[in-house]
Image (cartoon, grey):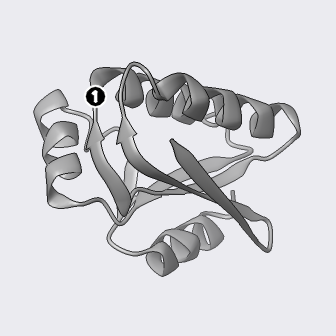
Amino acid sequence: MKIDEEKKGEVLVLVPGGRIDSASSTELERVLTSHLGNGERRLVVDLGQVEYISSAGLRVLLMTAKKLQDGSGGLVLCAMPESVRLVFELAGFVPIFSIEDTRDAALDRLAASGA
């Protein structure tokens, strides 16, 4: 799995590509954990290049969201392809996450939250 990174002011944007499944989710978890350990508290995960996400990938994103729930940070997901959004819907995860259609909307949401 390839994960591009971009810093937009105070926000770290991660763009994973390909499949997020049991084999590749460990890489995503490693990257997210490393950034959280280095003090990143405001994250956007742009899922626009993700073809598939499994329950292992959902777990990694849920774990990250929970770590940022203490009020000092935030996680916004964006640009989900329809197939990826369907997995979130079937798992009942849509209400749990902050989800936006575009990266700009995700960045705006984090800015508006003050997180």
Residue 53 shown left or right of residue 67 in the figure: left
Check the image and report above or below for 102 versus 37.
below
Q: What element carries label 1?
A: loop
In the image, 5 versus 13, the foreground residue is 5
> Which residue is drawn at the image coordinates 68% and 59% (left, top)?
5
Q: Is residue 31 found left or right of 54 in the rendered image?
A: right
In this picture, residue 8 sits left or right of residue 76: right
- The quadrant in which residue 87 appears is top left
Q: Mark 1 points at which residue?
A: 54
Q: In which quarter of the image is residue 62?
A: top left
Q: Which residue lies furthest to the right in this view?
A: 38
As rendered, which of 4 and 45 lies closer to the eye?
4
In this rendering, the count of numbered labels is: 1
**What's under tag 1, amino acid-wise?**
Ser
Residue 23 percent across, percent down from the top left: 43, 21
- Residue found 55% across the figure and 48% down from its top: 2
Left-right relation of 16 to 14: left
Q: Residue at x 75, y 47 (%)?
A: 41
Q: How crowded is mark 1: few (under 14 residues within 10 Å), some or many (20 or more)?
A: some
Q: In the image, residue 1 lies at what x, y percent?
A: 50, 41
Across and down, in percent, residue 21 comes to 35, 27
| Vertical position of residue 91 compared to residue 95: above or below | above
41 and 27: which is toward the camera: 27
Q: In which quarter of the image is residue 35?
A: top right
User: Compared with residue 88, is residue 6 higher up or lower down, i.e. above or below?
Assistant: below
Quarter in which the C terminus is drawn = bottom right
